Image (tube, coloured by chain):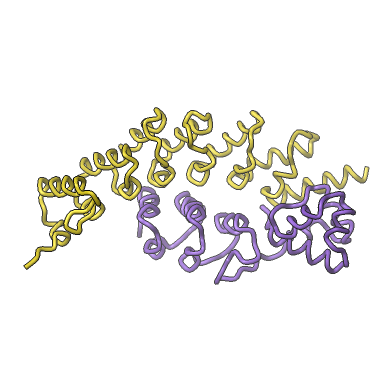
Chain colours: A purple, B yellow
Amino acid sequence: MLDSYAIGNKIRDLRVANQYNQDKLAEILFVSRQAVSRWELGLTLPSVDNLIELSKIFKISFEEILCMNEPVVIDEENIFVGHDRHFIIKKIIENKLEVDLFDVFYQFSNSERLIVLKAIKNNKIKASLPRLWVKLTPEEQKYLKNEVTIK
Amino acid sequence: MTINLKRMIPFLDKDELTLLIEKIKASENQEYEGVKLMSVIPFLEDEMIDKLFLEELDKDGSFVSIAPFVSDNMWPIVAEKIINGNSTTNIVGLFPFMDEKTLGDLFIKAEAEQIAGLDAVKFLPFVSDEAVDNAFLNRIKANKDYLPFLPFVTDECLHQFAEAFCQGDTEVDIDAMYPFMTQEDIKMIFRHVIEKKEN
């Protein structure tokens, strides 16, 4: 999964560094200015064709525009700053982003909490449940209770 | 001297608790001498809790707050009520408590639009990966909106679309799907398109 927010920032930085405004870039790519704006805000990603065109215009690889091979740097105070929320959640449940769930659990929305708890329940990620337990609602505790032995 | 009824709850017997519940239910503000239904629930027997839960569900009352105490054999009954249209309440709050099978059955019915007012997308964080993948594939076949499913679909399931696209299947909406694929699949797709453009 890609980090649309980080990619949006990358496209904006490349556009500014190459001295294009949004209108000019949109004109070159035959898209609307709003489309460029939405990419830069991380709301959508360019199509495959447009991304290949962008890599030609900015003379860098598509991997660089897509922020592939870049380490994911997070701020523990707000793990979502500068990133797509789905991207961060997916990294966590795939064990590709190390966070102390006890410290960051309050930052998740209700559905994100359940996605993370489901991953714990399915043994996809390891977490110190006795420690986390106090942060869970009765509903969330019940959700885990039947499956997980608290040691 | 005034007696604090709330502090006495743990010491009440079954009949006294039943009487207290009747008084709470009969009162206008659902409270009797400072005691609300939720304060009594943890001290009731399972059978009584289940009965109260169904009553609250039927009248669209505070059934979600009772849900953590409900016995597991209640969920198929609840699911049947929902499927038969006997419960029109917002039951999304109950999903975390339901067992996987009951939830999976409800999800299939919601996907088939057999439960009025219940959007199958709301089930996605709770149902199994297999159920999500199957529903996603069915939506594609039926030409239905599959975009809300993409963040929940497994990498393995999306991989088959990456492969199909690279093998020339132009029906695949790769622009919508690639952001949710693995880096390996994304690289494969981009290299395929670049190669095609160069030739």
Identify whether A120 is placed above or below A77. Answer: above
Side of A42 where B78 appears, left or right: left
Q: Quadrant of residue A86?
A: bottom right
Furthest-left residue in this view:
B1
Q: Quadrant of the C terminus of chain A?
A: bottom left
Identify whether A80 is placed above or below A32. Answer: below
Q: How many marks?
A: 0
Residue in front for this viewpoint, B23 or B192? B23
Furthest-right residue in this view:
B199
Residue in front for this viewpoint, B164 or A134? A134
Side of B2 where B130 appears, left or right: right
Residue for point 62% across, 56% down: A87
Residue for point 17% across, 60% down: B6
Residue for point 15% across, 57% down: B10
Side of B140 where B22 appears, left or right: left
Percent coordinates x, y for residue B98 in the rendering: 39, 42
Side of A77 where A56 appears, left or right: right
Percent coordinates x, y for residue A142 in the rendering: 36, 51
